[in-house]
Structure formats: structure tokens, C-alpha cells
Image (cartoon, helix red, strand yellow):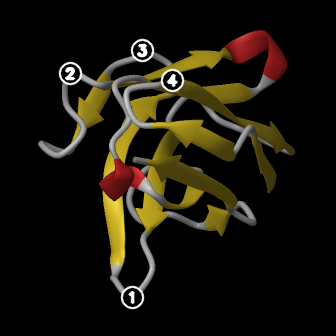
């Protein structure tokens, strides 16, 4: 499985941005797609995930209510809609997939999001 993340860029605080993660290869009904980020000088942070079959989502408290994860099964693509962005959301954002559930097996290359104050 290969993951291609895109959509990063520069946005002002309070703005919105949508990231995409296109998966090539086998994505099973049991797969879970996750979003993570790594801010400068910080450890990688879990943002949330979506279950491929049901569309059920989970979010970290730091983004709950501001970020929304969705998927398009036909396009094998997962989205991260980010609203009300804050400077502290500045990070490299990564998507990952747990093909059969469990641990994340494959990771995208990351896309940089910069939020200016």
C-alpha cells in the first residue's frame, strides 16, 4: 500500500484547509486510516482515525470539534478537513493505514501545514 498526502500550505489563523490522502493498493474493509502530525521540536501526535468500512471516526481532544475526517471509498481517499486553524496546528501532517486494523503499517510522506498568526 502506498499513501500520498497532499493539500498542505500556508493559511492564516482562523482559516481552513483540507488535506487528502490517496491510497494505492489493497485497502480492506477492516482497514483503519489515521492522521498524525509532528510539530517542530515535538513528538508525533495522533489526530484521529476513520474506519474504512463504517466511516466511524475518532479524534484527539486537541482537534475535536475543529477537524473532520472523511473518506471516499470509490477513490480510496481519506480527507482531513481542518477549520478554525491555530498557529499551534503548524506541523507536518501524515496519513497512515492499519491494513488489517491494529498497528499502522504504511505511512504517507507528510504534507506541511503552516498557520500564521
Among the two numbered marks 3 and 1 on one chain, the one whose residue lies closer to the N terminus: 1
| Residue position marked by numbered label 4 in the rendering | 16
Q: How many marks?
A: 4
Residue 2, x across and y down, in percent? 83, 56
Separation of residues labelled 3 and 4 (CA atoms): 26 Å
**Which structural element holds mark 3?**
loop
For mark 2, does the 10 Å Cα neighbourhood hold few (<14), some (14 to 19), or many (20 or more) residues?
Answer: few
- Identity of the residue drawn at 56% across and 54% down: 114
Looking at the rendering, which quadrant does residue 10 occupy?
top right
Separation of residues labelled 4 and 1 (CA atoms): 24 Å
Q: Is residue 96 above or below residue 22?
A: below
For mark 4, does the 10 Å Cα neighbourhood hold few (<14), some (14 to 19), or many (20 or more) residues?
Answer: some
Among the two numbered marks 4 and 1 on one chain, the one whose residue lies closer to the N terminus: 4
Image position of 84 (left or right of 1)? left
- Identity of the residue drawn at 68% across and 14% down: 72
**Which structural element holds mark 4?**
loop
Q: Are marks 3 and 4 in contact (CB under 8 Å)?
A: no
Among the two numbered marks 2 and 1 on one chain, the one whose residue lies closer to the N terminus: 1
Q: Are marks 2 and 3 in contact (CB under 8 Å)?
A: no
Q: Where residue 65 is drawn, which disc sits there?
A: 2
Q: Where residue 54 is drawn, which disc sits there?
A: 3
Q: Nearer the viewer, mark 3 or mark 1?
A: 1
Separation of residues labelled 2 and 1 (CA atoms): 25 Å
Q: Are marks 4 and 1 in contact (CB under 8 Å)?
A: no
Q: Where residue 41 is drawn, which disc sits there?
A: 1
Looking at the rendering, which quadrant does residue 102 occupy?
bottom left
Between residue 31 and residue 11, name the one nearer to us. 11
Amino acid at each position: 500500500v502506498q499513501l500520498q498526502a497532499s493539500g498542505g500550505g500556508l493559511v492564516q489563523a482562523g482559516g481552513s484547509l483540507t488535506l487528502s490522502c490517496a491510497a494505492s493498493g489493497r485497502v480492506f474493509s477492516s482497514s483503519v486510516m489515521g492522521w498524525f502530525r509532528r510539530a517542530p521540536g515535538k513528538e508525533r501526535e495522533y489526530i484521529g482515525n476513520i474506519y474504512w468500512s463504517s466511516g466511524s471516526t475518532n479524534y484527539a481532544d486537541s482537534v475535536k470539534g475543529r477537524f473532520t475526517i472523511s473518506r471516499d471509498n470509490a477513490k480510496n481517499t481519506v480527507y482531513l478537513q481542518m477549520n478554525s486553524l491555530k498557529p499551534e496546528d503548524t506541523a507536518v501532517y501524515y496519513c497512515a493505514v492499519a491494513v488489517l486494523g491494529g498497528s499502522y503499517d504504511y505511512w504517507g510522506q507528510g504534507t506541511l501545514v503552516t498557520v500564521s498568526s
